[in-house]
Amino acid sequence: MKNQWIIYLVGNVTVKVSGRGMERFLNVLIRQGIQIWNVKRHGTNTITFKIMLQDALKIRHLARNSECRISFLRRNGVPFLLKRLYKNSGFLLGSGLFLVIVFLLSNIIWGIEIKGAKPATEYQIRQELDKMGVKIGKLQFSIDNAEGIQRKLTNNIEALTWVGVELKGTTYHLQVVEKNEPERPQKLSPRNLVAKKKAIIVRMDIDDGQKKVDVNDYVEPGQLLVSGEIGKEGEESRLVAAKGEVWGEIWYKSHVELPLKTKFHVYNGKEKRKYSLLAGKFEVPVWGFGSHEYNDYKTEKNTHKLHFLKWELPISFVDRTIRERETVIRTYTNKEAEENAVEQAKKDIKKLVDEEAIFKDEKILHKDIKNGKVILDIHFKIIENIAIGQPITKEIHE
């Protein structure tokens, strides 16, 4: 017989024929060009066979002129399947709608929990989340992923040292570490305070211990500043953990070369969005077909895991934003280049000193313009805390 898939697509019918002259009836069907197959005899007066759906009406007419009776037993194929689906369309539509609703509800933000933040900082975080569209009732795959939210919060809120963002089910959990968080009191063993850099002492704020240097003294690295061994002359000495700050004036020299012409990229506002579904390594586009015409561009990709109730599906929703950018060349005047070079030198120095360090003075020792660059040698005078703890290992005897 023909391809079974074709038979299933067009539909077929199982026919039962009973009565006298069954063989003659089959011969009539064949002469009329009606295809029959799976012919089976059931007793002496009954046979069954299959025909195409399109021939079902023809055999009724031919059966009237014969001594046989016909009946249709089974109906198979796509036409009958579609008919059954149409009869049950209300149930299928309701079931499909139910699954879609559950799927959408499983991918909506229903909670945002913030831990470790003060009330004022928490308010700032929630305000920033609102600006990013991270709010209750929002679809998860319409916003940035957890890494993107974390990066934007850290960049936009100065009070944050670190924030961890994790999506559990339909709730975002944020763990916050704030700047200038009060340090937990720690038990210190007996120690001295020594200099970590060479400097001239400008201020001393000592809480415990005995001073060994004074203001305006010049000190070398490792030199004793505050002793943890205290006691009056002639009395028993005791060991304590020396505490305090010793601020010293330190000199730094920086060499900077900055080009007078700087090339950088800027976005011109043109962008294209593309959406797709990702299953393993197989990706299916769902919106934003076609290629773009940008010569210079940057693609930002966000991948969101999809959920159904509490289960994470092996399917991800991928959101790509393709932004066109242009190359801009900026030319600085000698004065502008000099100012930028000084700022760049300060940034480099800040990497070498504590956050509390104070820039007291700066002096350009040498300036030159060569090969399209401004070249500076700069001398910085900085005030910073130079005291670090050094454990005391010796014992005190009576």
Image (spheres, helix red, strand yellow):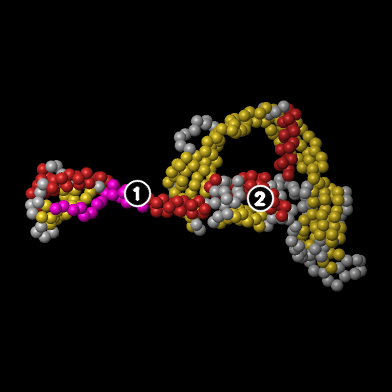
| Residue placed under numbered mark 1 in the picture | 86
Residue found 72% across the figure and 27% down from its top: 333
Residue found 76% across the figure and 64% down from its top: 188
Mark 2 near mark 1, Cβ–Cβ under 8 Å? no
Q: Position of residue 397 (x, y in %)?
A: 83, 71
Q: Quadrant of residue 177?
A: bottom right
In the image, 284 versus 137, the foreground residue is: 137
What residue type is disc 1 on?
Tyr
Q: Quadrant of residue 389?
A: bottom right
Residue found 79% across the figure and 65% down from its top: 190
Is residue 84 on the magenta stretch?
Answer: yes
Q: Position of residue 171 (x, y in %)?
A: 58, 55
In the image, 117 versus 158, the foreground residue is: 117
Q: Which label number is shown at residue 39?
A: none
Label 2 environment density (alpha carbons within 10 Å; few <14, some 14–19, many ≥20):
some
What residue range appears in magenta?
Answer: 69-88
For the residue labelled by badge 2, is the local secondary structure a helix, a strand or a loop?
Answer: helix
In the image, 284 versus 296, the foreground residue is: 284
In the image, 223 versus 89, the foreground residue is: 89
Q: Which label number is shown at residue 126?
A: 2
Instruction: Pick out the residue farthest to the bottom.
Output: 398
CA–CA distance in space, label 2 to label 1: 49 Å
